[in-house]
Image (cartoon, rainbow, N blue to C red):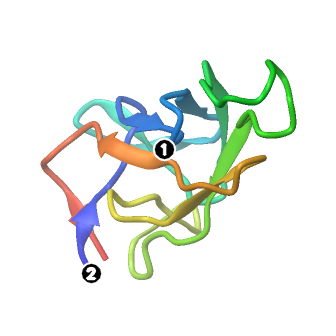
Amino acid sequence: MPGFLVNAAATVQCSHAGTASPDMKSTKVKVDGQPVILQDATWSISGCASQDPPNGPGNDKTATFSTGSTRVKVEGKPVVLADSISSCVASGTPASIADAGQTKVKGI
């Protein structure tokens, strides 16, 4: 299903309202002035408000996306789409894309 390409201006959070930031952005392709995010990026999470003790086993530290574009490739890799599926390490809950960072380019 088509979805907006996620760029570096995206708002991504774990299910406990932690903020996620990708470690891998395209060095060659930008959408709306921001680099697109490659599917194999690891997203670092800060501010996870899980009820586990700080730094406990249930606090989300990272997230990864298991799905991405099937037809759009950047630098030979799929990109994250606004409807891509993710999982947070520790809790196993999904990270959610509240805003893809742009509304100009869709991919499949």
> Does 68 sit above or below residue 100?
below
Say which amino acid is labelled 1: Lys
**Which quadrant would residue 47 be assigned to in this image?**
top right
Is 49 placed left or right of 58 in the picture?
A: left
CA distance separating discs 2 and 1: 25 Å
The mark total stands at 2
Q: Please name the residue that numbered disc 2 is placed on.
A: 1
Residue drawn at x 14%, y 46% is: 103
**Residue 29 percent across, percent down from the top left:** 41, 46
Q: Residue furthest front?
A: 51
**Residue 11 percent across, percent down from the top left:** 37, 33
> Does 95 sit above or below residue 79?
above
Is 34 placed left or right of 22 in the picture?
A: left
Is 32 placed left or right of 51 in the picture?
A: left
Q: Please name the residue that numbered disc 1 is placed on.
A: 28
**Which quadrant would residue 7 be assigned to in this image?**
top left
Q: Secondary structure at mark 1?
A: strand
Is 60 placed left or right of 25 in the picture?
A: right
Say which amino acid is labelled 2: Met
Q: How crowded is the residue under tag 2: few (<14 C-alpha within 10 Å), some, or many (20+)?
A: few
- Residue in the foreground of this view, choosing between 67 and 95: 95
Residue drawn at x 58%, y 66% is: 77
Q: Nearer the viewer, mark 2 or mark 1?
A: 2
- Residue in the foreground of this view, choosing between 91 and 73: 91
Q: Secondary structure at mark 2?
A: loop
Q: How crowded is the residue under tag 1: few (<14 C-alpha within 10 Å), some, or many (20+)?
A: few
Tag 2 near tag 1, CB within 8 Å: no
Q: Quadrant of the N terminus?
A: bottom left
Residue drawn at x 21%, y 41% is: 102
Residue drawn at x 54%, y 55% is: 94
Q: Earlier in the sequence, mark 2 or mark 1?
A: 2
> Does 56 sit above or below residue 14?
above
